[in-house]
Image (tube, helix red, strand yellow):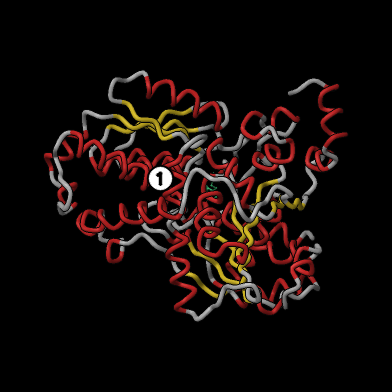
């Protein structure tokens, strides 16, 4: 923790820190947002990333029959019953439509990490295969499923530090390709995630510390090996690009539903946030496509506001929530992050509209409502965006835009949950029910 005098000065400079440190749910709007940002990536990087996904379609069809047509994508579903229920509960009506981008259903990894995590592993594999002339341009990538390819990759190591879901995506994909893969798990990682990884052939290393410690240790141990490659959630361009390609698919899904996005019909997107890589990548892709007509909001637990702390203090990845006396203890393990991503945060700083925080109890209640109203089961982290339309509508943000509220399309991003075992699923639900009853 920083010294008292410094903290006092910081609170004077940035008054919202008082509430953040008091663990109160806050809403913050980004004054640094620019319509003409200076970014090191462009839409062409997104198209290039999409081409990599396309090259690997034959591989996916070969080894993961559960991936429909070899394309890793999730449905966009209208959750009008959830909306009606919350409208009544909040005594405040959201007039636009509300959709759930159902990344909890993404095949194989069961979370949004299928986008970033798979992408980075595939890109690394492709590069190695090119360097060693095992593939050439134009080849059928079903080749990556062949035994001699697997044997080749077995001489290479991939490492990753994770609170759970990133480890699952990197571990499963790396092991499938034949890599020797080590997953360095933080203390808050769930036991079933560790088990599932071991079952899939990954080596799991457990740490008593938090996510940042798992990352530092994993980084060190991986890079000490001659053929080691570390997937660095605290600073990864490839994870970011992997997430960004969803923007192209979402555009298509909106077109199919005849949903317009323009000045009169803005798109509001609510993204659960850990290090800020997945919400950052998604936001970057969407901003490249929809420009000023898309408004992206990130959501963090009140006890893990890593990106918020980095942005409001301007210290970005150089400050952690622990530095300002916040615990980083949350049941939302996908968001249990104390320090933001370096790569993602400097981009999000120019693109995101704002960020709000939410209490753990609220996540569990939303989990119950989503299940009861829509029969959709997700993990606690994935519910954080659901309340976004109500949070933002309580502020002046929408009236400042001068648009008809009815024309807004709200999308809450459901980031994970389909792999959660039945027993844990039931426990989440029962806890949420208890909390709802004691209101
Ligand atoms: C990882 C994760 C997030 C957040 O992604 P970051 O890149 O860490 O910001 C949100 N929800 C779930 C379920 C996740 O696993």
Q: State how many labels appear.
A: 1
Crowd class of label 1 (few under 14; some 14 to 19; many from 20; radius 10 Å): many
Of residues 166 and 32, which is closer to you in this image? 32
Please indicate whether residue 428 sits to the left or right of residue 140 in the image.
right
Residue at horizontal 59 percent and vertical 41 percent from the top: 345
Q: Which residue extends farthest left?
A: 148
User: Where does the C terminus fall, quadrant-wise?
Assistant: bottom right
Q: Is mark 1 within 8 Å of ligand 1?
A: no
Residue at horizontal 33 percent and vertical 44 percent from the top: 172
Question: Is 221 above or below relative to 285?
Answer: above
Q: Position of residue 57 (x, y in %)?
A: 25, 58
Question: Is 410 above or below relative to 182?
Answer: below
Disc 1 element: helix
Q: Position of residue 276 (x, y in %)?
A: 57, 44
User: Where does the N terminus fall, quadrant-wise?
Assistant: top right
The answer to whether residue 381 shows anywhere in this view is yes
Please indicate whether residue 242 sits to the left or right of residue 302 in the image.
left
The answer to whether residue 430 shows anywhere in this view is no
Q: Quadrant of residue 83?
A: bottom right
Residue at horizontal 62 percent and vertical 45 percent from the top: 331
Q: Quadrant of residue 342?
A: top right
Of residues 198 and 110, which is closer to you in this image? 110
Please indicate whether residue 143 sits to the left or right of residue 272 in the image.
left
Residue at horizontal 42 percent and vertical 65 percent from the top: 249
Of residues 322 and 422, which is closer to you in this image? 322
The residue indicated by pointer 1 is 117
Q: Position of residue 55 (x, y in %)?
A: 25, 55
Q: Position of residue 313 (x, y in %)?
A: 74, 35
């Amino acid at each position: 923790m920083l010294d008292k005098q410094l903290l006092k000065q910081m609170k004077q400079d940035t008054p919202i820190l008082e509430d953040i440190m008091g663990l109160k749910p806050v809403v913050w709007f980004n004054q640094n947002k620019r319509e003409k940002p200076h970014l090191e990536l462009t839409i062409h990087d997104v198209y290039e990333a999409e081409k990599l996904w396309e090259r690997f379609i034959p591989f996916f069809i070969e080894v993961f029959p559960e991936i429909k047509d070899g394309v890793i994508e999730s449905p966009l579903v209208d959750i009008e019953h959830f909306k009606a229920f919350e409208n009544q509960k909040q005594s405040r009506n959201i007039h636009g439509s509300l959709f759930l981008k159902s990344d909890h259903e993404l095949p194989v990894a069961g979370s949004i990490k299928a986008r970033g995590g798979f992408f980075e592993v595939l890109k690394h594999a492709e590069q190695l295969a090119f360097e060693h002339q095992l593939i050439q341009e134009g080849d059928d990538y079903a080749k990556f499923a062949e035994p001699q390819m697997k044997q080749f990759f077995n001489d290479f190591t991939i490492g990753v530090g994770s609170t759970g879901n990133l480890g699952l995506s990197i571990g499963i994909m790396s092991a499938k390709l034949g890599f020797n893969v080590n997953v360095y798990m933080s203390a808050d990682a769930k036991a079933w995630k560790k088990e599932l990884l071991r079952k899939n052939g990954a080596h799991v290393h457990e740490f008593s510390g938090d996510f940042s410690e798992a990352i530092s240790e994993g980084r060190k141990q991986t890079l000490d090996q001659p053929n080691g490659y570390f997937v660095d959630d605290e600073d990864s361009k490839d994870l970011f690009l992997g997430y960004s390609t969803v923007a192209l698919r979402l555009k298509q899904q909106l077109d199919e539903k005849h949903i317009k996005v323009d000045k009169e019909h803005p798109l509001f997107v609510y993204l659960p946030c850990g290090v800020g890589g997945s919400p950052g990548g998604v936001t970057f892709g969407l901003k490249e496509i929809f420009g000023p007509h898309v408004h992206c909001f990130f959501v963090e637990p009140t006890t893990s506001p890593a990106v918020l702390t980095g942005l409001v203090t301007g210290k970005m990845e150089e400050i952690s929530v622990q530095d300002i006396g916040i615990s980083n203890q949350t049941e939302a393990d996908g968001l249990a992050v104390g320090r933001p991503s370096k790569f993602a945060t400097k981009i999000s700083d120019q693109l995101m509209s704002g960020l709000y925080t939410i209490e753990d109890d609220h996540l569990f209640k939303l989990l119950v409502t989503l299940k009861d109203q829509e029969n959709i089961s997700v993990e606690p982290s994935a519910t954080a965006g659901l309340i976004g339309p109500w949070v933002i509508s309580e502020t002046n943000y929408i009236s400042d835009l001068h648009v008809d509220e009815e024309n807004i399309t709200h999308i809450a991003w459901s980031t994970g949950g389909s792999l959660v075992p039945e027993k844990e699923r039931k426990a989440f639900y029962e806890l949420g029910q208890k909390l709802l009853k004691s209101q």
